């Protein structure tokens, strides 16, 4: 493959994954408006993010089992087209009973796009695979930042229903160029991994400890990304646009902190990668409690970037850690398990936060939940073996 065409494919795919993650988080910055428009409570609004992540969980493990035997380019193309078609009813019939199922169906396609694209990227840069995948993984936080910041403005300009498709359509526009630049990268069909050997990857107690710690980390990440705009509007008196811009710093800092966490784990803390995880949880515990006492613009300007950096610092470390727990031939299964457990945490976080807000009529229980997640993650980290 020519270097220029390979580079063009990479950046087109990176941009598509940015839009994919903006699509995932799009309802969160306008939860308040959606609650009013659909006449639903906080938990139901949170479900517009949670249900998408839930369906992604259901696809993750079986998808990983079959993905190496399928044409990844065709999988990406079909999934992007399907994502747009599945989202259209939410625009044509903008009522909650119609919108929620469309988010569920779209969620089935999200992990197929992400994982299949990552496989093609890895094959495109065999001489620099880790570096290429590292940059590729900066796309999700960039997408969350885009969705958190831009959605309130787009909702005001285009109308609330269009937020459910406005980030999917650019992926469709990018698709022909992605297909052209990725020609020749289709993976040949290979032998299926025996099912019993595949399932053995999920019986490691140590892997479960690590996966649950990642679930706590990802739950904190999704909580701060999804509910902070609503909190800052309701408790801090900020406009939706300003609160969205502040909350966008949480995912945006991942572009910096995710590579730094991996660098620290490979360098200074190579002897005990748990240190990176522990730093994150120890710092996030008190920072989660601070919000019980303030919702001011200046505190948010200081604290949200710090939280965004710290909560994503261990992301790449979890994957490196898991690859040391299982045999090398099961590395893909280890990564899949990390993805699945993290998504479980991300699925539960916005729903539980909305539920606590509904029953307590206050954000205090939600921040106590965040502190409890940080404490649980720290205990799980300390109970893991040093590596």
Image (tube, grey):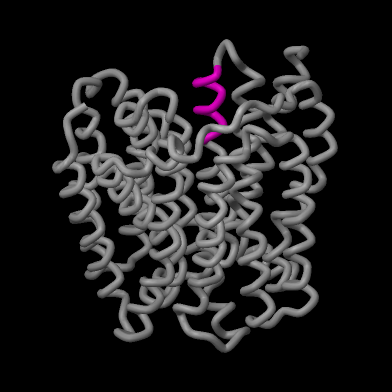
In this picture, is 48 found above or below 371? below
Q: Is residue 28 visible?
A: no
Q: Residue furthest bottom?
A: 39
**Quadrant the C terminus occupies:** top left
Q: Nearer the viewer, residue 20 or 159?
A: 20
Q: Nearer the viewer, residue 315 or 336?
A: 336
Q: At x 32% / y 43%, what residue is drawn?
A: 203
Q: At x 62% / y 38%, what residue is drawn?
A: 67
Query: Is residue 323 shown left or right of residue 243?
Result: left
Q: Is residue 133 magenta?
A: yes
**Quadrant the N terminus occupies:** top right
Q: Nearer the viewer, residue 97 or 7?
A: 97
Query: Is residue 238 shown left or right of residue 263?
Result: right
Tell me the chief SS of the magenta region: helix
Query: Is residue 95 shown left or right of residue 181?
Result: left
Q: Position of residue 169 (x, y in %)?
A: 77, 54
Q: Position of residue 253 (x, y in %)?
A: 43, 42
In this picture, is 118 found above or below 271? below
Q: How many marks?
A: 0
Q: Nearer the viewer, residue 251 or 47?
A: 47
- Residue 334 found in image quarter: top left
Q: Is residue 98 magenta?
A: no
Q: At x 65% / y 26%, what residue is drawn?
A: 190
Q: Is residue 116 visible?
A: yes
* Residue extent of the magenta highlight: 129-137
Q: Position of residue 282 (x, y in %)?
A: 18, 47
Q: Position of residue 260 (x, y in %)?
A: 37, 29
């Amino acid at each position: 493959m020519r270097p220029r065409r390979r580079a063009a494919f990479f950046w087109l795919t990176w941009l598509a994954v940015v839009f994919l993650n903006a699509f995932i988080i799009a309802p969160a910055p306008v939860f308040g408006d959606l609650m009013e428009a659909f006449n639903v409570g906080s938990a139901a609004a949170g479900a517009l993010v949670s249900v998408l992540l839930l369906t992604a969980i259901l696809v993750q493990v079986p998808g990983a089992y079959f993905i190496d035997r399928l044409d990844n380019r065709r999988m990406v193309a079909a999934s992007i087209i399907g994502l747009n078609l599945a989202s259209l009813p939410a625009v044509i019939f903008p009522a909650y009973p119609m919108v929620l199922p469309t988010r569920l169906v779209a969620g089935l396609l999200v992990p197929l796009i992400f994982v299949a694209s990552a496989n093609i990227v890895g094959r495109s840069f065999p001489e620099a695979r880790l570096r290429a995948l590292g940059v590729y993984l900066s796309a999700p936080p960039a997408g969350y930042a885009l969705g958190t910041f831009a959605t309130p403005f787009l909702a005001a300009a285009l109308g609330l229903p269009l937020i459910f498709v406005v980030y999917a359509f650019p992926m469709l526009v990018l698709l022909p160029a992605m297909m052209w630049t990725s020609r020749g990268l289709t993976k040949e069909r290979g032998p299926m991994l025996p099912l019993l050997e595949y399932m053995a990857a999920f019986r490691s107690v140590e892997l479960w400890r690590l996966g649950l710690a990642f679930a706590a980390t990802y739950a904190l990440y999704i909580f701060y990304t999804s509910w902070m705009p609503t909190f800052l509007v309701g408790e801090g008196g900020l406009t939706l646009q300003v609160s969205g811009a502040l909350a966008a710093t949480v995912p945006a800092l991942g572009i910096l902190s995710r590579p730094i966490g991996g660098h620290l784990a490979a360098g200074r803390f190579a002897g005990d990668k748990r240190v990176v995880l522990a730093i994150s949880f120890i710092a996030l515990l008190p920072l989660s409690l601070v919000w019980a006492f303030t919702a001011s613009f200046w505190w948010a300007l200081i604290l949200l970037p710090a939280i965004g950096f710290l909560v994503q610092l261990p992301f790449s470390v979890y994957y490196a850690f898991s690859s040391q727990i299982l045999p090398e031939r099961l590395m893909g299964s280890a990564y899949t398990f990390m993805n699945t457990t993290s998504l479980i945490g991300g699925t539960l976080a916005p729903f539980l936060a909305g539920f606590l807000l509904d029953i307590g009529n206050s954000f205090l229980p939600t921040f106590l939940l965040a502190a409890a997640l940080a404490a649980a993650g720290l205990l799980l980290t300390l109970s893991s073996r040093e590596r």
